[in-house]
Amino acid sequence: MCAIDDFCLSCLPPFIKSLCQTERDQLGKFKSALTNFEYVSPESKSNNELLEFAYNVVFTRSWRSDEGDYRIVPVADMMN
């Protein structure tokens, strides 16, 4: 996801490019939202590898509810 640089992104077909840009934007919002949480240590907030792992755990093991928020379903990946 974040390993794609701007040059590689420019080589992608338009639909795939938009999906990748959306994921990059959503990851950026995820990282910036964590700055408001005091119980997350500064070391964790500055560890990009850890933040990308946490982001992927949340968004690959969650379902969007009718209210628009995400709910983590621990065994959802077993249904795939």
Image (cartoon, grey):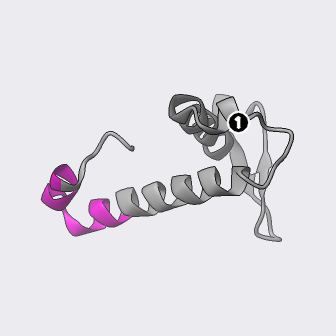
| Left or right position of 1 against 42 | left
Name the residue at 15% across, 53% down: 7
Query: Residue 40: which quarter of the image?
Result: top right
| x then y, percent, for residue 51 | 60, 37
| Left or right position of 57 against 5 | right
- The local crowd at label 1, few if under 14, some if 14 to 19, many if 20 or more residues have their Cα within 10 Å, is few
Amino acid at circle 1: Pro
**From what the image shows, is residue 12 above or below residue 50?**
below
| Left or right position of 11 against 40 | left
Specify whether residue 78 is painted magenta: no
Query: Residue 54: which quarter of the image?
Result: top right
Could you say which is closer to the camera, residue 15 or residue 57?
A: 57
Name the residue at 63% across, 46% down: 59
Range of residues picked out in magenta? 7-18
Q: Which residue is under mark 1?
A: 42
| x then y, percent, for residue 78 | 66, 28
Specify whether residue 14 is painted magenta: yes
Q: Quadrant of the C terminus?
A: top right
Name the residue at 61% across, 42% down: 55
Name the residue at 67% across, 30% down: 43
At mark 1, the secondary structure is helix
**From what the image shows, is residue 72 above or below residue 21?**
above
